[in-house]
Image (cartoon, rainbow, N blue to C red):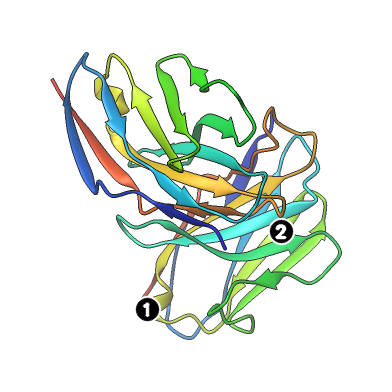
Amino acid sequence: AQKITQTQPGMFVQEKEAVTLDCTYDTSDPSYGLFWYKQPSSGEMIFLIYQGSYDQQNATEGRYSLNFQKARKSANLVISASQLGDSAMYFCAIGGNTGKLIFGQGTTLQVKP
Amino acid sequence: GAVVSQHPSWVICKSGTSVKIECRSLDFQATTMFWYRQFPKQSLMLMATSNEGSKATYEQGVEKDKFLINHASLTLSTLTVTSAHPEDSSFYICSARDPGVGTYNEQFFGPGTRLTVL
């Protein structure tokens, strides 16, 4: 079974600063993928970044980077230079060979001007 | 590319009626579609996996007679909430996936359907 844990229900960050959203996971699959999604108040799920379990380097996508520590089973999302539009709920998810995604509880991020 | 639509975007119905939600992959063929349910400020809970041409696989605790899923074509899956009750009020989100579509074989999500049962 796969499990994702996000321990930060809510986070605040000052505009233009960086913020780290925590995510830990548990799985018995040797091959898996870790995803981060953003969900604004409109409800749509926006894909942000992906990390494969065999990827040697941490994934980066623009202002988003993933701090992948396989031995610790953590996949934290780092958002640099926060913007007001980054205020949303953020979900970490794990997927395996079945294609199913298991989501964490989510973290609500508020960016202060 | 890889756009998924849902219809309707919101629906209000009376208790005891049935409601059908459609999920369409607009520019790719989805061999697999997933249905999620989300309560306010909570996580997405996977309800079922829908494979084209075969019966849906339901997650533990999800009533298959209550939530009927049909994946009749490679671009359409439907979720029917039968005899809806107020506790079925929720945000329902579908996603679609096909090997080779997307950079990371990821799921593409629809915009969601907000169901309110009076």
Number of marks in the rendered image: 2
Query: What residue appears at the point 43 percent right and 22 percent down from the top-left corner?
Result: A65
Would residue B102 appear left or right of A77 to someone viewing this image?
Answer: right
Q: Choose top left, top right, bottom left or bottom right for residue B14.
A: bottom left
Callout 2 amino acid: Ser
Residue B115 visible from this viewpoint: no
Q: Looking at the picture, tell me which residue is in the foreground, B48 or A52.
A: A52
Query: What residue appears at the point 40 percent right and 16 percent down from the top-left corner?
Result: A63
Would residue B59 appear left or right of A18 to someone viewing this image?
Answer: right
Percent of width and height locating residue A81 = 28, 14
Q: Quadrant of the C terminus of chain B?
A: bottom left
Residue B59 visible from this viewpoint: yes
At mark 1, the secondary structure is helix
Query: What residue appears at the point 21 percent right and 16 percent down from the top-left corner?
Result: A17
Q: Residues within 10 Å of mark 1 (few under 14, many from 20)?
A: some
Mark identifier at residue B86: 1
Q: Quadrant of the N terminus of chain B?
A: top right
Would residue B40 appear left or right of A61 to someone viewing this image?
Answer: left
Q: Is residue B106 above or below residue A97?
A: above
Q: Choose top left, top right, bottom left or bottom right for residue B73.
A: bottom right
Percent of width and height locating residue B89 = 40, 70
